[in-house]
Amino acid sequence: MKKRIAKSDLPTKTCTACGRPFAWRKKWERDWDSVKTCSDRCRSDLRRRTRESSK
């Protein structure tokens, strides 16, 4: 049987869009190194901001 890991022991990052910390999720297991935002909303906000600044 696997041991459980406490949420406080999971790795965390800071969201590049909103600046809030977020923790590792199972669905990000394969690509944790490439995850930069905490949610779909932050990802779309970040894309929109970079598109507007390039105009």
Image (spheres, helix red, strand yellow):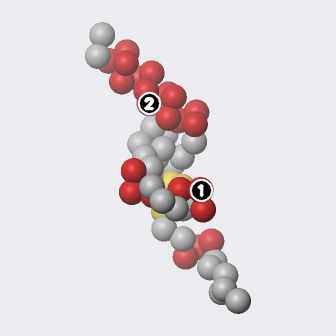
Determine the CA span between mark 2 and mark 1: 21 Å
**Residue at the disc numbered 1:** 27
Q: Residues within 10 Å of mark 2 (few under 14, many from 20)?
A: some
Q: Residue 35: image x %, image y %?
A: 44, 50
Point out the residue furthest to the bottom here: 1
Q: Secondary structure at mark 1?
A: helix
| 2 vs 1, front mark | 1
Whether tag 2 and tag 1 are in contact, CB under 8 A, the answer is no
Q: Is residue 11 above or below residue 41?
A: below
Q: Residue at x 55, y 76 (%)?
A: 9
Point out the residue furthest to the right here: 1
- The quarter of the rendered structure image containing the N terminus is bottom right
Q: Can residue 23 be seen in the rendering of this structure?
A: no
- The quarter of the rendered structure image containing the C terminus is top left
**Residue at the disc numbered 2:** 46
Q: Residue at x 48, y 68 (%)?
A: 11
Q: Residue 2: image x %, image y %?
A: 66, 86
Q: Residue at x 45, y 21 (%)?
A: 48
Point out the residue furthest to the left here: 54
Q: Residues within 10 Å of mark 1 (few under 14, many from 20)?
A: few
The quarter of the displayed image where residue 3 is located: bottom right
Amino acid on which disc 2 is placed: Leu
Q: Residue at x 57, y 42 (%)?
A: 39
Point out the residue furthest to the top here: 55
- In the picture, measured across the screen, residue 48 lies left or right of residue 2, that is left
Q: Secondary structure at mark 2?
A: helix
- In the picture, measured across the screen, residue 43 lies left or right of residue 27, that is left
The quarter of the displayed image where residue 17 is located: top left
Tally of marks: 2
Q: Residue 6: image x %, image y %?
A: 63, 77
Q: Can residue 36 be seen in the rendering of this structure?
A: yes
